[in-house]
Image (tube, rainbow, N blue to C red):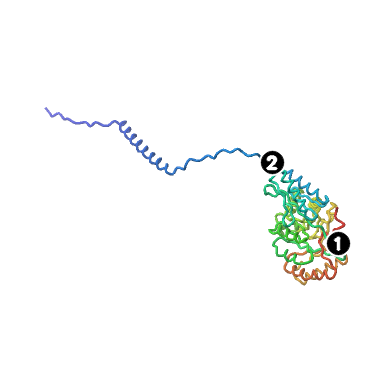
């Protein structure tokens, strides 16, 4: 008999048992990793956020706009100022008033302060060193009242008004002009960094102030009057708004003259809008006459706005001796016509010529006067 072969068959582990084993191991490892990560994160966890205690809202702050305006109007009515002496600009913030007269007495100011306090402790009134009445609410300016001293008596003999344009780019030219006894008129560009400061300096020295209003010239944009200028392409509403904004930048202004404007002053529609604003505020206009086709004088007369125009540009050439010749020509015009207006710019040569020649003109009997004095007897009451 052959040997019977015997073999041992190995028992294999079923597949489902192997899978279950690996799944258990993976779960254990995953749990371990998750636990380590969670424990590590606990050390960096931010402290619990504190919830602030809930507070009850306070009472609403009352609107004091009507109170402020009515008390300001009542204060002005209680003074000796006539209605025509008070110009209002109620479209700006803060509200602006310009008064042709001396600042109020301490007693009147104290009375206004008391009435405001009776309405609310948030309200106050004070006078600044440069004669501005400030009505404030909780320290915020709500009303500004600018006081402009009355004009001096009209002098006898030929009269000359000299307008210094382009002021506001620094204080040095203003300092030089204030050192001259003869009262040169300050025409201030509203967009310049020192515009308000120069206006304050001039006002403190009782010098006349004009707004030098930028207007579109021929040749724009190669010749640029600035982004805040008046352009003929604007609507009447936009021109009026821009003009009012420019006026607000130069306190104490009693009138205006144009900066550039050879295009704009030829435009009847635009100039009519400008004159409407001037009429409402009781201001005058001086045509710098940068174009022979200007309609400024005609439109001003049609709208009842006091108006004059330039007779001589004094410094087309910035040379002391040539400026002196132009000053003499201006004086001759004043002798012939009773009065004349010269316009100049704050060049070093111009300042030197004025310092040297204006006292000489005064000695010759030619009076240097504010522009407004040339309009006395012709301005609306």
Question: Is residue 92 at least partly visible in the picture?
Answer: no
Q: Which residue is mark 2?
A: 62
Q: Quadrant of residue 160?
A: bottom right
Q: Residue at x 86, y 61 (%)?
A: 154
Q: Residue furthest top?
A: 1
Marks 2 and 1 sit apart, C-alpha to C-alpha, by: 50 Å
Q: Nearer the viewer, residue 19 or 151?
A: 151
Residue 171 in percent (x, y) is at 70, 63
Disc 2 versus disc 1: nearer the observer: 2
Q: Residues within 10 Å of mark 2 (few under 14, many from 20)?
A: few
Circle 1 crowding by C-alpha within 10 Å: few under 14, some 14–19, many from 20? few
Residue 199 x/y as whole percent: 73, 58
Q: Secondary structure at mark 1?
A: loop
**Earlier-in-chain disc, 2 versus 1:** 2
As drawn, the label of residue 154 is: 1
Residue 326 drawn at (x, y percent): 80, 68
Residue 152 position, x and y percent, is 83, 60
């Amino acid at each position: 008999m052959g040997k019977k072969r015997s073999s041992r068959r190995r028992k294999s582990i079923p597949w489902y048992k192997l899978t279950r084993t690996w799944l258990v191991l993976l779960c254990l490892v995953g749990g371990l990793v998750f636990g380590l990560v969670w424990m590590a994160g606990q050390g960096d966890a931010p402290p619990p956020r504190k919830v602030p205690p809930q507070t009850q809202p306070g009472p609403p702050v009352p609107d004091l706009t009507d109170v402020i305006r009515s008390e300001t109007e009542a204060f002005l009515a209680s003074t000796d100022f006539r209605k025509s002496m008070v110009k209002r600009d109620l479209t700006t913030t803060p509200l602006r008033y310009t008064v042709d007269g001396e600042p109020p007495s301490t007693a009147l100011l104290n009375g206004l302060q008391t009435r405001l306090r009776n309405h609310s402790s948030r309200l106050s009134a004070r006078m600044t060193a440069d004669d501005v009445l400030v009505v404030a609410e909780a320290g915020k300016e709500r009303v500004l009242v600018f006081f402009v001293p009355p004009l001096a008596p009209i002098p006898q003999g030929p009269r000359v008004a000299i307008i210094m344009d382009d002021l506001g780019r620094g204080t040095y030219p203003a300092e030089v002009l204030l050192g001259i006894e003869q009262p040169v008129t300050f025409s201030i560009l509203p967009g310049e960094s020192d515009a308000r400061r120069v206006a304050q300096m001039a006002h403190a020295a009782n010098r006349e102030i004009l707004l030098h209003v930028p207007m579109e010239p021929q040749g724009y944009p190669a010749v640029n009057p600035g982004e805040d200028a008046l352009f003929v392409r604007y609507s009447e509403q936009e021109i009026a708004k821009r003009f009012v904004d420019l006026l607000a930048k130069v306190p104490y202004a009693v009138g205006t003259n144009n900066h550039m404007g050879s295009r704009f002053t030829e435009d009847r529609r635009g100039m009519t809008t400008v004159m409407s604003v001037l009429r409402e505020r009781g201001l005058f206009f001086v045509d710098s006459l940068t174009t022979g086709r200007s309609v400024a004088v005609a439109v001003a007369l049609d709208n009842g706005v006091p108006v004059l125009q330039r007779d001589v540009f004094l410094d087309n050439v910035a040379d002391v001796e040539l400026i002196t010749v132009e000053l003499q020509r201006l004086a001759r015009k004043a002798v012939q016509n009773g009065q004349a207006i010269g316009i100049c710019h704050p060049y070093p040569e111009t300042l030197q010529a004025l310092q040297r020649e204006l006292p000489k003109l005064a000695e010759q009997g030619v009076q240097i006067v504010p522009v407004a004095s040339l309009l006395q007897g012709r301005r609306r009451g």
